Image (spheres, rainbow, N blue to C red):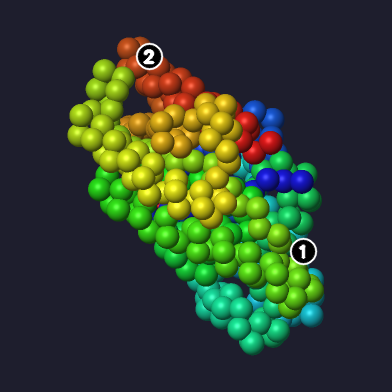
């Protein structure tokens, strides 16, 4: 059975998508079969797998392959078609044979409203009972088709009903964050929202209407894998002083606010489990510095920074040697991240 991991932070631009793609690739490189889901109407993850550099490329893709995206795959449930959900015909990732994508759709946000109504768990639930379990069911049958070990779910920033559903019905979640004042502030809302969503999933799972739906609402088992702090500058191999200050503030907010809130909501493993998996400081799964110029190469060839070759970077001599050392360091970081995830999810 595949293990699902959601990438969530209501704060935008904190490397949710980048980390989903990079970790997915790394897990795939290590022999796991991985299906990624682009559940963000911005479709940034889809743009990392598909070549969308031509104008209207995404529209052309939807036109040519109308069934090959998350929104279309959910249509039987959302448009109440007398037709069962079917596994998605995923997109294979060029350069990484164990990695697949359920492409996103810019119109997915339209389904937010009906899902929101269904998730209020009011009298209307009978008519909409197939919606809350539909995403989970679709991911399961698609993972089965690809014999996947992992399902990685990239989410939009924000607190909408799709995010609520996908986080609460996932097996695990990680919180990507940046060492800045906005990410420190976001910890407070994460500490309030996640327990609320977990409690909602507990009550949803107990509702008869949802249990005997075509796509039953799953028994919640959500656990927090940790924080991923990303995009800071280095000096002499360490975060610069300005960034170190934010690291300390983030760690303090995680330890003082997030951990107690998640703990009482049953979202944490025992402390030893995190320690044995080798997490740093305040439940930090990884610290990933700024990719600097490598990010441009990475976007151009649609590969993670740690998988870039000399040909991709197109530099020689000393410049290449420096870049190569950076690529190797990122490779080490993502290998450690993948090992920690493997340790926690077993
Ligand atoms: N470690 C890094 N170094 C440099 N640039 C990075 C790094 N991580 C992410 N980025 C860049 O930062 C931007 C935001 O990253 P990304 O899209 O992954 O964030 P996000 O949390 O998914 O955003 P959104 O909330 O809009 O979905 C992107 O342009 C990405 O290329
Ligand atoms: Mg994103």
In the displayed structure image, the side of residue 149 where residue 19 appears, left or right: left
The answer to whether residue 237 shows anywhere in this view is yes
- Tell me where residue 123 appears, x and y as whole percent: 64, 87
- Tell me where residue 3 appears, x and y as whole percent: 68, 45
Rendered residue at 28%/41% (across/down): 249
281 and 138: which is toward the camera: 281
In the displayed structure image, the side of residue 301 where residue 36 appears, left or right: right
Rendered residue at 20%/34% (across/down): 242
The relative height of residue 227 versus residue 164 in the rendered view (above or below) is: above
Q: Which of marks 1 and 2 is in front?
A: 1
Residue 153's mark?
Answer: none
Residue that label 2 marks = 321
The relative height of residue 64 versus residue 270 in the rendered view (above or below) is: below
Q: Residues within 10 Å of mark 2 (few under 14, many from 20)?
A: few
- Tell me where residue 243 appears, x and y as whole percent: 25, 34
- Secondary element at image label 2: helix
The answer to whether residue 15 shows anywhere in this view is no
- Secondary element at image label 1: loop
In the displayed structure image, the side of residue 339 where residue 299 appears, left or right: left
Rendered residue at 54%/41% (across/down): 225
- Tell me where residue 204 appears, x and y as whole percent: 65, 70
Q: Is the residue marked 2 within 8 Å of ligand 1, measured from its CB? A: no
- Label 1 and label 2: CA atoms lie apart by 48 Å
Residue that label 1 marks = 86
What is the quadrant of residue 186 in the picture?
bottom left
């Amino acid at each position: 059975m595949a293990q699902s991991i959601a990438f969530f932070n209501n704060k935008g631009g904190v490397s949710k998508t980048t980390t989903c793609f990079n970790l997915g690739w790394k897990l795939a490189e290590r022999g796991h079969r991985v299906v990624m889901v682009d559940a963000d109407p911005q479709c940034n993850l889809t743009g990392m797998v598909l070549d969308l550099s031509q104008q209207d490329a995404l529209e052309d893709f939807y036109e040519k392959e109308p069934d090959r995206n998350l929104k279309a795959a959910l249509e039987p449930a959302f448009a109440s078609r007398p037709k069962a959900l079917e596994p998605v015909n995923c997109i294979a990732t060029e350069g990484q044979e164990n990695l697949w994508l359920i492409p996103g759709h810019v119109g997915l946000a339209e389904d937010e409203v009906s899902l929101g109504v269904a998730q209020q768990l009011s009298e209307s639930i009978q008519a909409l009972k197939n919606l809350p379990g539909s995403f989970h069911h679709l991911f399961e049958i698609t993972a089965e088709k690809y014999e996947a070990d992992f399902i990685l779910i990239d989410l939009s920033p924000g607190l909408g009903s799709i995010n609520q559903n996908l986080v609460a019905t996932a097996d695990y979640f990680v919180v990507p964050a940046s060492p800045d004042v906005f990410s420190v502030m976001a910890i407070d809302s994460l500490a309030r929202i996640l327990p609320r969503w977990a409690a909602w999933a507990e009550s949803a799972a107990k509702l008869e209407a949802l249990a005997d739906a075509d796509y039953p609402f799953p028994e919640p088992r959500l656990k927090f894998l940790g924080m991923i702090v990303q995009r800071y500058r280095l000096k002499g191999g360490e975060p610069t002083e300005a960034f170190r200050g934010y690291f300390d503030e983030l760690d303090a907010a995680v330890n003082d606010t997030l951990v107690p809130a998640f703990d009482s909501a049953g979202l944490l493993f025992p402390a030893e489990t995190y320690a044995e998996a080798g997490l740093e400081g305040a439940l930090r799964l990884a610290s990933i510095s700024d990719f600097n110029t490598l990010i441009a190469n990475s976007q151009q060839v649609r590969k993670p920074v740690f998988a870039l070759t000399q040909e991709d970077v197109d530099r020689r001599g000393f410049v290449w040697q420096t870049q190569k050392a950076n690529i190797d360091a990122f490779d080490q970081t993502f290998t450690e991240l993948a090992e920690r995830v493997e340790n926690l999810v077993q």
